[in-house]
Each structure stands twice: as structure tokens, then as C-alpha cells.
Image: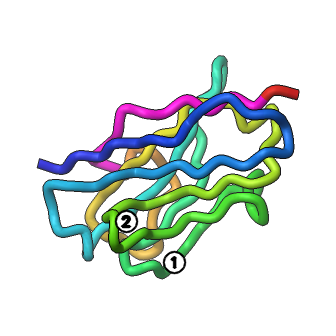
Amino acid sequence: QVQLVESGGGLVQAGDSLRLSCAASGRTFSSYALVWFRLAPGKEREFVAAMLWSGCSRRYADSVKGRFTISRDNAKNTVDLQMNSLKPEDTAVYYCAARFTVYPPPIVDQEYSYWGQGTQVTVSS
């Protein structure tokens, strides 16, 4: 059974940085795509970043390009989201999701089969 557990959220000020982690277990993920979405109050769930477990095919939403970086930590078996220069509009619950590999990794939430419980990120102005 695939399990995804997010961590690292919190309350920060505009301009600060946060690093989110998604711990993946229950499967060999070498053939999987991992993605981060976010859900802000009153808005639809929004794609943030995606990559194949191999580290290839990184994709970013235009709103986070240049500020966020998705990566894999082999030692911890996590997919991380480094978020720099945070803005109040980045405030949301951030979700990690996974699916069997499709190239390129999809940016539509319906394409993903497995989801974590989410972690709250709040950026104050």
C-alpha cells in the first residue's frame, strides 16, 4: 500500500524559506511520478511542481518557477519541495501525490492515484 506523508509546513513571513518533505513508502518508486499540489481557501487545487522519481522531467507552475525546487532525497526516500522567497499568495495546504510513471509527469490532479494528508503553509505579509 502506497503511503505518502508530508511534513515541514508552518507559519513564516514573506521572503522566508520552507522545505517540505514527502515521505514515500509501500512501493518501489523508481517507476513513479511525484508531484506537489496546493489548495488555498476559496480556490481550486493548483499544480506546483512535479518530477519523475529518477529526477528527470522536473516541471513547475509559472507562479513558483525560480523560487521553488523539487528534488529527491535518496537517503530519506523523500521528495522535497524547497520554497524560497515565499509570498502571502503561497499560503495553502500542500499535498504530495504519486502515480505510476507517465512522461512527462501530469500536472492535473485527477491523474494521480495516491495522496498524502497535506501540510499547511502560511505566509504572513
Q: Which mark is residue 57?
A: 1
The answer to whether residue 7 is magenta is: no
Residue corresponding to mark 2: 33
Residue 54 at x, y = what percent? 38, 80
Residue shown at 72% from the left, 49% from the top: 17
- The magenta stretch spans which residues? 112-123
* Circle 2/circle 1 CB separation < 8 Å: yes
Of 3 and 108, the residue lying toward us: 3
Looking at the image, residue 13 sits to the left or right of residue 25; the answer is right
Q: Tag 1: residue type?
A: Ser
Q: Quick one: SS at disc 2?
A: strand
N-terminal-most mark, 2 or 1: 2
Is residue 87 depicted above or below 82 in this figure?
A: above
Is residue 26 depicted above or below 89 in this figure?
A: below
Residue 13 at x, y = what percent? 81, 34
Count residues near mark 2 (Cα–Cα under 10 Å), then give few for <14, some for 14-19, many for 20+.
Answer: many
Q: Tag 2: residue type?
A: Ala
